[in-house]
Image (cartoon, coloured by chain):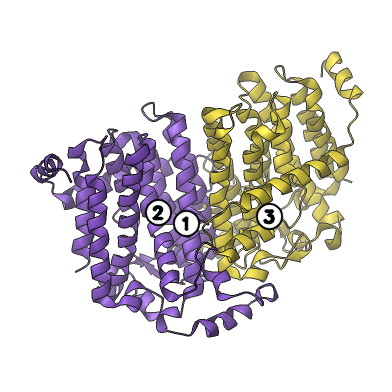
Chain colours: A yellow, B purple
Amino acid sequence: MTKAARTVSNKTTLDFNAYLKQRAHLVEKNLSKFTAKIPNSPKILTDSMEYSLQAGGKRVRPILAMATAEAFGKKAADVMPAACALEMLHTYSLIHDDLPCMDNDDLRRGKPTNHKVFGEDLALLAGDALLTYVFEVFAQNGKIKTIGAENTLNALQNFAHRAGASGMVGGQTADVYAEGMGTHEAASVRAEKLKKTSKKLSDKSLHYFLLPSSVKETTPENVLRYIHANKTGALICASVETGALLAGAKGADLKHIQQYAQCIGLVFQIVDDILDVTASAEQLGKSNSDAQNGKLTFVSLFGLEGSRKHAQLLIAKAQKALDCLKNVKRKNLTPLYAMAEFFKTRTY
Amino acid sequence: MTKAARTVSNKTTLDFNAYLKQRAHLVEKNLSKFTAKIPNSPKILTDSMEYSLQAGGKRVRPILAMATAEAFGKKAADVMPAACALEMLHTYSLIHDDLPCMDNDDLRRGKPTNHKVFGEDLALLAGDALLTYVFEVFAQNGKIKTIGAENTLNALQNFAHRAGASGMVGGQTADVYAEGMGTHEAASVRAEKLKKTSKKLSDKSLHYFLLPSSVKETTPENVLRYIHANKTGALICASVETGALLAGAKGADLKHIQQYAQCIGLVFQIVDDILDVTASAEQLGKSNSDAQNGKLTFVSLFGLEGSRKHAQLLIAKAQKALDCLKNVKRKNLTPLYAMAEFFKTRTY
């Protein structure tokens, strides 16, 4: 950070918890507005979508998008449709992730999961409806004059890329097949099991199930890094990028904010792994299923201290990336710095 | 149709079957190009997406989008990303529809369904990945200069609307709950069953599960019309609209082509209901599950002859709507007229 910049950000005092709460409230109000505007749906479907959308959560993704847009000189309201779309996408992924054929979870944030209330078929459809609505809502950002159609389309395309097979869903796929690797089950044993699931898959290597071809070796560490960068990281990353792209960020500034986004995205999942071990089920609002299922996690691979160290290195790198930004309103960067600090405190 | 217009379209001879085959081939080639461009996904996920995308089908949706864009003066290639996105969206809906918690089908177009080959969890994820990729691919249409960002964003928003809770997914939701209504099970008995599924739903009326508030009475006919207009109709409709909106269609022309789209969309599902009864499982490439499951269909409600009559009235209405178009290349309307005729021949 330059000396001048550091002075500015030190001068700004921010009650980050109050900020998060106020912003989360703003997001929830807008989410309600959007789900109230689905004219031609059976009521049970919109109720099911609304049930999961309003089941709590910190709303980190839309908050990051708004904060980044503000750093690049736009108003939070200028990116509200896209910000809400980010939260909707996150919510659909939770609904589908909880389904019996996936994690089979009964509780989410202390409440019965969507399929426990509405049935498995409707939970599937509510997830599909949300994922589709995500893009209808995101596209509305193009109508906001300070953003326009071109920036919206750019941001939407990048967002879909991060949320799909090359991002979040890719990470979820690897996560499904990596189950058991955290308990040091030999990779070869795992591969044999997988091959028995289908004739079509019988001649496939373990790599086929877990990694893109760009990653060469099928080591537990490579698998873990792929899962973490994509399953949760990609969407956190997309949140920051969405704010930046909607605001028209370009060149070196875009690269630096992407660096921040990638670090924050990875930290988010490492912190989740740490909390899965250190926090109680009550605090998490769900059962500690990852540890119990023997999933591959940062903690299972590098231990608690190793994971904390790694997270803190990433946080420092994220903050350095913010230091390098040029065409930004420096005082508006405070929440992005604070977000990194926020993750730091969550590791203990 | 004006006399001049009718003369032009009569003059044009079109081998429609050859046209459909050639266009389907073009779509399949482009679909392969798009799925080859997913850089960061485990191979199994893209294989699963590709498996269902290349499992055949007439590719009616992208063909309609291309034909409509051509009618409004653009080239088929100008709308190729969006056209492929339409087919991807259709494919995801089939994958999810076949899942055990939905129709639980083992065969689709004569081949094992996606979850039979890749497992239930991966079929869910492949559907999610396709639905997300749909919008990444659609957004690429904005880079084509003859179309631009603004028309692409308009078309994308309309398309997402038709594909989601207010369209296709809404129709699927009603379809799930309407199962059994085709065998004249009393609505009240059905409602009682539904209420037992969840405490949250215990005080709900049948209407809650089946219809949007804009439809007043919960009659089997209203339910059927809602399902048909949305479950299949909405996406057929969106295909035509996508071609028109990308090409910048406006005003009265947009209204007329939408009228055509709505008629064609409804006919498509009525024909499907007729074929479900008259064609063999071999011809359909799937078991006649609708009739066997006692689903509410046009045939179960109006009989075979009544359904045929209704379809033919809609086809005539669709063709009349084409007659009214003004700012179009009349000779390029031939495939849209032929598409209506094509549905007519399929009713026998």
**Residue type indicated by callout 2:** Leu
Q: Earlier in the sequence, mark 2 or mark 1?
A: 1
A173 shown above or below A194? above
Disc 1 chain ID: B
Q: Which residue is mark 1?
A: B167
The label on residue A323 is: none
Q: Are marks 2 and 1 in contact (CB under 8 Å)?
A: yes
Please tell me which residue lies in front, B57 or A112. Answer: A112
**Residue type indicated by callout 1:** Gly
Q: Are marks 2 and 1 on the same chain?
A: yes
Please tell me which residue lies in front, B348 or A200. Answer: B348
Local SS, label 2: helix
Q: Which residue is mark 3?
A: A53
Pick the quarter of the image with the C terminus of chain B: bottom left
Q: Which residue is mark 2?
A: B235
Q: Distance from label 2 to label 1 (Cα)?
A: 8 Å
Local SS, label 3: helix
Local SS, label 1: loop
Question: Which is more foreground, mark 3 or mark 1?
Answer: 1
Disc 3 chain ID: A
**Where residue A174 sits in the image (x, y, percent)?**
60, 52
